[in-house]
Image: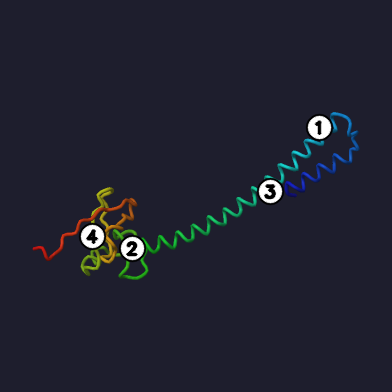
């Protein structure tokens, strides 16, 4: 039995008592029943809102997981950001193929490997989530 049904049941019990409506006790019971009915409606609306928001949060969480996979996950061997631990790849093999840029995060000290195609303004450490400032020196300057 939900709250609205319980409130109706209590109202029915009170009506079954056949109280004299002019007595203060009957007026008090009537007002208390009105309050219970109002509260049950408000609580039912809140429960519906909470259920809706819970479903909405789950959808957002699923969408965020997709974004996290795009930013931090591995879709294929050429597109990744990792320190060797986050994606179970071998960091040394990665460096030998020269397909990534190795950086030590100044915030946490973690060695991070980035795909060279990623904009250096968007380097974010997967370990501490801090932005990494990078100044590249071109090989042509030698």
Q: Residue at x 26, y 63 (%)?
A: 91
Proximity of marks 3 and 2: CB atoms separated by less than 8 Å: no
Secondary-structure class at tag 3: helix
Instruction: Report which residue position mark 3 lands on.
Output: 44
Instruction: Report which residue position mark 4 lands on.
Output: 102
**In whole angstroms, how far apart are the C-alphas of marks 1 and 2?**
70 Å
Q: Residue at x 81, y 45 (%)?
A: 9
- Horizontal side of 118 relative to 49 (left or right) equals left
**In whole angstroms, how far apart are the C-alphas of marks 3 and 4?**
55 Å
- Answer few, some or many: residues within 10 Å of disc 1's Cα (few below 14, many 20 plus, some between 14 and 19): few
**In whole angstroms, how far apart are the C-alphas of marks 4 and 1?**
76 Å
Instruction: Report which residue position mark 2 lands on.
Output: 88
Mark before the other along the chain sequence, 3 or 4: 3
- Answer few, some or many: residues within 10 Å of disc 3's Cα (few below 14, many 20 plus, some between 14 and 19): some
Tell me residue 90's x, y (percent): 28, 64
Proximity of marks 1 and 2: CB atoms separated by less than 8 Å: no
Which label sits in the foreground, 2 or 4?
4
Which label sits in the foreground, 3 or 4?
3
Instruction: Report which residue position mark 1 lands on.
Output: 28
Secondary-structure class at tag 1: helix
In the displayed structure, 2 sits above or below 24; it is below
């Amino acid at each position: 039995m939900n709250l609205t049904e319980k409130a109706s049941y209590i109202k029915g019990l009170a009506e079954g008592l056949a109280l004299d409506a002019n007595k203060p006790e009957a007026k008090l019971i009537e007002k208390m029943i009105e309050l219970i009915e109002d509260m049950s409606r408000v609580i039912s609306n809140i429960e519906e809102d909470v259920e809706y928001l819970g479903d909405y949060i789950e959808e957002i969480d699923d969408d965020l997981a997709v974004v996290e996979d795009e930013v931090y996950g591995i879709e294929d061997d050429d597109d990744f950001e990792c320190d060797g631990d986050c994606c179970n790849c071998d960091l040394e093999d990665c460096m030998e193929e020269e397909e990534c840029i190795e950086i030590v995060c100044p915030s946490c000290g973690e060695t991070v490997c980035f795909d060279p195609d990623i904009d250096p303004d968007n380097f974010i450490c997967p370990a501490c989530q801090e932005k990494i400032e990078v100044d590249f020196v071109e090989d042509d300057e030698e």
